[in-house]
Amino acid sequence: MMDDILVLVEHRQGEVRDITFEMLGKGRQLAASQGAKLTAVLLGSGSGKLAEQVASQADTVEVINHEAYADFNSDTYQRALANLIAEREPLLCLIGHTSYGIDLAPSLATQLSVPLITDVVDLNLDSGSIVATRMVYGGKARARVRAKSPGAIVTVQPGAFTAAESGAKGEIITTAGSLPGEKARKRFLEFIEAASEGVDIAQSEIVVSVGRGIGDPKDIPLVEELATALGAVLACSRPVVDKRWLPKSRQVGISGKTIKPKLYLAIGISGAFQHLSAVKGSGMVVAVNKDPKAPIFRAADYGIVGDLFKVVPALTERIRQAKNGK
Ligand SMILES: Cc1cc2nc3c(=O)[nH]c(=O)nc-3n(C[C@H](O)[C@H](O)[C@H](O)COP(=O)(O)OP(=O)(O)OC[C@H]3O[C@@H](n4cnc5c(N)ncnc54)[C@H](O)[C@@H]3O)c2cc1C
């Protein structure tokens, strides 16, 4: 048939993950350019509510219902999807480049003998053939690749695409799943939430983030004081976590948290793609950096080019004065 674009709905703990909506946003764009149909595939157990959430962004939501699909299991998921994909022969199948997708997609593609393109940050259909940009060498370089045959499975990097409300009202088709054949080789045991040390940076309306530009952990309190003056939480970029200056729960970015505060202040952060894609939903971005060419300034609404050791104390002081009515 080759006229379907399939998107695998990723859900966890009864919630559709953002990556699903990002893939549907891109899928919608590609489907429109090809006159193709956008189908969201939801493997779940009693997941009617999740299907409703996705229906506004796809032409069809195919729910395959089975208690074995309540929680992610690459083994049972692979069996269900292999059948569906073999039957449908879609033009393209999008799966999140997440811990789930990384577990599932390679073995699914191998079973189906279809091309696999992983960690994709851009995607196009050029006369029906799939052209993708993917991260290589741990994100240090990008490669442009073309699938040799249609029907590729593509894993999409979180944050690479934007979710878009289509206003459509997709049809929800529910079928009962079955698990014939041998017993599942993997079993879902339990979900353990990572400890967040009481602070959830994704919940705060104002976030002040410190980057490698701070240079020394003893100076982090300087930025923390600014955060306190603003009633903000303190967050950071990945190198600050890698150096163990702040805990992982404070990390903003694709391998940390995606945040959407009303105000985001980036202090001594260069603005790498992996960082910026996790703050693009912020109301306003303000950056302080001594390098006028830092990429963060392209994403910022306001930028201060200067030494953070001068700018940050001055900002803190000014905010304190404003609060005291001076
Ligand atoms: C697979 C993968 C996942 C990743 N996930 C994440 C992620 O989740 N989050 C994340 O943040 N990164 C992530 N990264 C890393 C990312 O690519 C960047 O390396 C990182 O974001 C850089 O952090 P930074 O901006 O703090 O440091 P740098 O890039 O070193 O920037 C420091 C900045 O501080 C400025 N500066 C220095 N001194 C001063 C001063 N005195 N005053 C003002 N400015 C100053 C410099 O001009 C510079 O722009 C990931 C990378 C990979 C490959």
Image (cartoon, grey):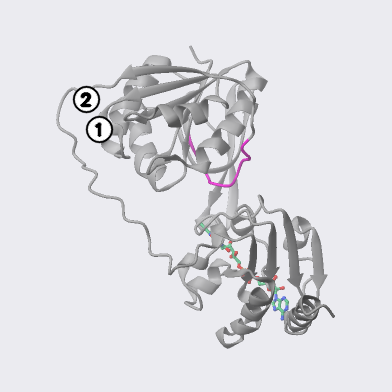
Q: Dividing the picture into quarters, in which one does residue 289 lie?
A: bottom right
| Mark 1 C-beta to ligand 1 under 8 Å | no
Is most of the magenta stretch helix, strand or loop?
loop
Is residue 159 covered in magenta?
A: yes
In the rendered structure, the answer to whether residue 94 lies left or right of residue 132 reads left
Q: Amino acid at mark 2?
A: Leu
User: In which of the image's four quarters is ligand 1 placed?
Assistant: bottom right
Pointer 1: what residue?
A: 68
Residue 273: give x, y in percent of width and height.
63, 55
Viewer-nearest residue: 57 or 322? 322
Query: Looking at the image, is 58 positioned above or below residue 267?
Result: above
State the extent of the magenta-drawn residues as a range. Answer: 154-163
- Residue at (30% x, 35% y) in the render: 70
Which residue reaches farthest left?
182
Is residue 77 covered in magenta?
A: no
Q: Secondary structure at mark 1?
A: helix
Count numbered badges in the picture.
Answer: 2
Query: Looking at the image, is 73 positioned above or below residue 200?
Result: above
Pointer 2: what residue?
A: 179
Residue 298: give x, y in percent of width and height.
77, 57
- Contact (CB < 8 A) between labels 2 and 1? yes
Spatial separation of the CA atoms under disc 2 and disc 1: 8 Å
Viewer-nearest residue: 253 or 221? 221
In the rendered structure, the answer to whether residue 190 lies left or right of residue 315 reads left
Q: Amino acid at mark 1?
A: Ala
Q: Secondary structure at mark 2?
A: loop
